[in-house]
Image: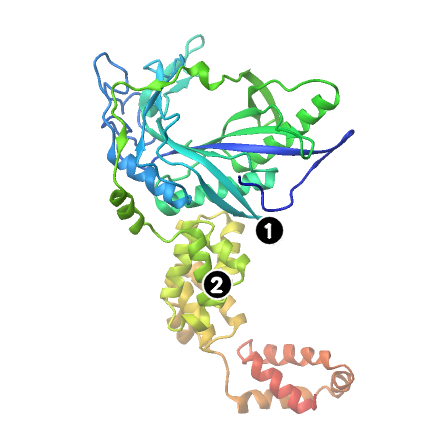
Amino acid sequence: MSAPATPHKLIKGATGDWEVVIGMEVHAHVTSRSKLFSGASTAFGGEPNSHVSLVDAAMPGMLPVINEECVKQAVRTGLGLNAKINLRSVFDRKNYFYPDLPQGYQISQYKQPIVGEGEVTVELDGGRTATIGIERLHLEQDAAKLLHDQHPSLSYVDLNRSGVALMEIVSKPDIRDAEQAKAYVSKVRSILRYLGTCDGDMEKGSLRADVNVSVRKQGAPLGTRCEIKNMNSIAFIGQAIEYEARRQVEVLEDGGRIDQETRLFDPVKGETRSMRFKEEAHDYRYFPDPDLLPLEFSQDFVADLKAHLPELPDQKKARFIADFGLSSYDASVLVAERESADFYEAVLAALADRARDGKLAANWVINELFGRLNKEGTAMSSSPVSAAQLGAIVGLIGDGTISGKIAKDLFEIVWQEGGDPRALVESRGMKQVTDLTAIAEVVDTIVAANPDKVAQAKAKPAAVQWFVGQVMKATAGKADPKAVNELLKAKLGL
């Protein structure tokens, strides 16, 4: 039985400490050109009801046909979650009536899902980790979308989303606080993006989560849970958990009881509110879909998909640390999103000596590039400085052509004007001065002109930095800082 692998936060109550128990159901749209059981397009943003087949509209006599690519995507995801792949699974009808469900039931999987138990390891503040168990992953079709703002007294329905393939990834109740919950969703989204099985765009609804929250005294049986539906923001997930856990503690400490129910989160008020009492599984009257045979495939089918998986975040992080000496934190930042990792690797590809400059490249990607992009609100895909240009700047620092200070000036020029960094260094005379004789002349002049500062430096060696600053100023920042330090210490006898 899995359990949290790290200390977690407890809620202080009037009657003692309370533990929060959280389970999550992540709903991820499968990356596929067509829907789970029809050939209709899955493209986002079409005119209402423009991507609808007769199957999606539940016309009489229309039969579902499984989309093989969606099956492959589910298996890839299961492999990425270190989960068991079930070679035989069954599609069931989940029966309930709602206007956004044309068939009056949802084709889903219940007792025999395509993917079984797995696990995800998440990183937390302070270098801590937690391992979250995966209960299952099953395939199902998404519902349509109700439009309530098109008419004063009627609701319209858009069937474009009806039948789009969803992977529901169900965690075990291993999550113990809001920090772990946010880290878990972030990690699952990152894995999906690396695999290319879901774009993870929460704003468009491609990925959303239902959050089950309960509280208990430590060591006590599990409490009654409430489900917070359709969360489409990682920040809001954290806020909703904090509020809901505190609400439940207050109810219990006031002598009340928690009813199992579905709740919604109001991001404006920062609170959850009741939506409906939660149905139990038997209320849905699951039974095997008579129009779909059991889904069966071979171990060779799974092995072939596994052999073609991309390098995943944890693997990439380990390689960055081993090959380039990155800290665990820096490697984690770079691999958190596939786009960031790809950019860093493109910078590495532009370097002549990756072993020497890999760590320096990471510092520049994280601190200079990411910092500037965040400051200006610019997406990485729109960065004015390309990976090749940044790689050239890092290479110029690594081979001693320019100093770190000159590099920052060069970065600014490339950001504002573009151009080849190496050509700019040549044309603008930005090369670092490494001629020891030339630097020594400047050092001699400044030392001779400042006998009082010389005495201070001999009494307090740290004061030598004043001289370093003066030499760098006199050489317009072009002197090699290492050479300046060595010459000054020799001149001053330090």
Quarter-of-image position of residue 415: bottom left
Q: Is residue 240 above or below residue 454?
A: above
Instruction: For marks 2 and 1, give the CA distance.
Output: 17 Å
| Residue 396 location (% of width, % of height) | 44, 73
Q: Amino acid at mark 1?
A: Arg
Q: Amino acid at mark 2?
A: Ile
Q: Earlier in the sequence, mark 2 or mark 1?
A: 1
User: Would you say residue 148 is visible in this rendering?
Assistant: no
Q: Is residue 134 above or below residue 224?
A: below
Q: Is residue 425 left or right of residue 220?
A: left
Secondary structure found at label 2: helix
Quadrant, the C terminus:
bottom right
**Image label count:** 2
Secondary structure found at label 1: loop
Q: Depth check: 207 or 397 in front?
A: 207
| Residue 77 location (% of width, % of height) | 37, 41
Disc assigned to residue 128: 1
Q: Is residue 269 above or below residue 313?
A: above
Residue at the spot of label 2: 321
| Residue 234 location (% of width, % of height) | 53, 37
Q: Is residue 306 left or right of residue 182?
A: left
